[in-house]
Image: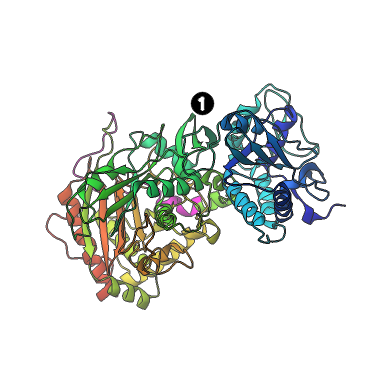
Amino acid sequence: MKDPVEQMPLSVDQEAMWIAWQRDPGQGIHIIPSPFPVRGTIDPACLGRAVDALGRSFPRLRGRVAAGARGPVLDWSDAPRIPVRESTTPLARDEAVRHVRQVPFDLDHGPLARVELLHGPDYTVLVLAVHHLVSDEASVLILADALRRAHAGEPLPAGDPVPAPRAFADRSREAADTPAGEAHRTYRRRPLGQDAPVPLPPRSVDEPAYTTPGDPLPAGLVARPRLGESSAADHPLHDPARAPAGSTAVRRAALVQERLWSAAPDGRHGLSVSLRLSRLPDDEALQEAVHRVTLAHDALRTHLGLAGNQVVQHVRTGTAVTPVRLPVRPSSGSAEVPDPLRDWAAEPFDLARGPLFRIAVLPERSGGGWLSLAGHRAVLDEWSLRLVARQLLAALDDAAPAEPSSFPDWLDDTAPVTTAEELAARAAELSPAAEALGLPGRRPRQTDTPEQEYEEGVVTFAVPRERAVREAAERLGVGHRDLLLAAFAALLGRYTGRQDLLVGVAHHARLPSDRHVVGPLATVLPVRLRPEAGEDLATLATRTAAEVAKATAHSGIPAEELMRLVDPSRTDRTAPPTEVLFDCDDHDGFDHGGFDHGGFDGHAGEADRPRPDVPGCADGAVRAVVETSGGQDAYDVALLLRHRSGRIEGRLAFDARYFDHDQMHVMAEDYLRLIERFVETPGRAVGETDRHPGRP
């Protein structure tokens, strides 16, 4: 019997790749070639030793697909060495690389990686090629760095562990039996073809299977749409001087991306972060840093599109982001983001063509200026944008490469899997509060005629006593965000007359394993709140904290999927999951040591530490402002709270089709009064208010 440490079961995705290979072993698909220009000379013997070290450190690269007790497995117990081939060719560089990557792998015998050293007329290129079954494009950068270190004589760690991928493989096969399996099966059928005979792995009679017009396919075959990827795509050389747009790989979209594609085809729903720098980098250094960072993260090279009737992600293999330099402006001591940058950030994105990430520089006559990053919520959340900003500054300092990430891979391989039982149980807990909230507006909603598109209005305000809010929350035994949410619940209860509400709460927190991922990982948690008029504010705060904790425990459930079950009458899939949103993020930009709220361990205080004076480096004071541009989403009301320099800045965004600015201004004032009640007199009843004449 094989040592289980030397083999692991295939995930459903890997099995689908194996079946696709069995159909046509000579077709060069699912191959990831990474060509690197060689400067200087390479000793083939030294390179061979480095490749051997890479194979020992990452033994799965030497594996093959074999039969296991419960299905196909990746086995490297008797794995061969990773081959190193050196050749001379008269072909031009790109043509030579294209020719090399069309050579297929033998999945039955392995290995699933190879190294080619190509000598052309005026170039030498090292190509590290791996099969998608054992790596992805982001992981190839890790492998290439390990190969570089091994070539330099550094020891590599022992063989990489397999418990996590093995557990994922088991989880993914179990997930195939859930209702989500039907959607995944659609992706699998399209590239395999409905009528083509498909060689199948042995399976037991009682194994669940889906029936298609062709051969029956096992339930485990619920793969993302990589099966149609062709090796004929152009993969750019990993050279900062070369940044072609390249071709695209098609991957399935997340539910939030599907909704944003349908709800906001005009490209609104952007985010921006603006950094005020005492010295701007030169254009060449900035372009090289942008190239390094965008190459590390698939999300920064992604746009959306349709495959049939299904929304998909298109991930470019190369970078296509060129920083824009805005006209020079007079120097200013103001910390406010200049209007030209706000206007630039508010420009809509083209979801179908991309890019959905962009960068602008606004120089000032003093030599400093602003560096602004903007992205669409379909590919980024605030956490991601701050992470990218940090990595861009690090790249300008010529720091270590950014840890790569692939949101499409995270979506397929790491995103939480929800069971039907968990989904139904959580929906039952929320269902009694599912009826429309019914905030009183100035204008009625049109039910029999088409409505105009969502139009955002905004009221801004500030909660000046941040410390007092935190201290009050501590006395009540809750988090300060729970207190602020409880005040919002009391406000909504008074305005609607309801004592049972469903509120969307933005969830920005991440697991440690997800903190390096750039993508739209932020979620909305539907939270049931009961601001009963007779109870005191302290009790409301305590019960609010408990409901948030309960919702957080189910944060892996997509809100869109949950709300369809909570309220089957919801037919508009472009609408946000709830009518109102509460979004309180505790970060303070770069102001308090960078991204301490984001959990980037080991980097606290970086913004306050003097940076080395190197060409292109951003030196001195850094100021970050993360803001929305063009709308949070089409909520009736969205309350956004951000902590800035000892106070809480508030932004009340509303649907201007139904609500007016003066109405929302009064609502913001009432909210501030309620916060003061929680701080000063938490024993007062929720229903005790000071009402202005004509106020709800």
Residue 445, compared with residue 169, is above or below; it is: above
The tally of labels here is 1
Question: Which image quadrant for residue 490?
Answer: bottom left
State whether residue 222 appears in this view.
no
- Does the segment drawn in magenta span residue 624? no
Relative to 211, is 376 above or below? below
Q: Is residue 463 above or below residue 323?
A: below
- For the point 80% across and 47% down, the residue is 79
**Label 1 crowding class (10 Å Cα cut-off): few <14, some 14-19, many 20+?**
few
Q: Is residue 468 left or right of residue 169?
A: left
Q: How is the image coloured?
A: rainbow
Q: Position of residue 509 (x, y in %)?
A: 46, 59
Where is residue 615, by image quadrant? bottom left
Residue in the image at 47% along x and 39% along y: 242
Q: Residue 158's spot in the image, x, y percent? A: 72, 60
Tag 1, which secondary structure?
Answer: loop
- Furthest-bottom residue in view? 475
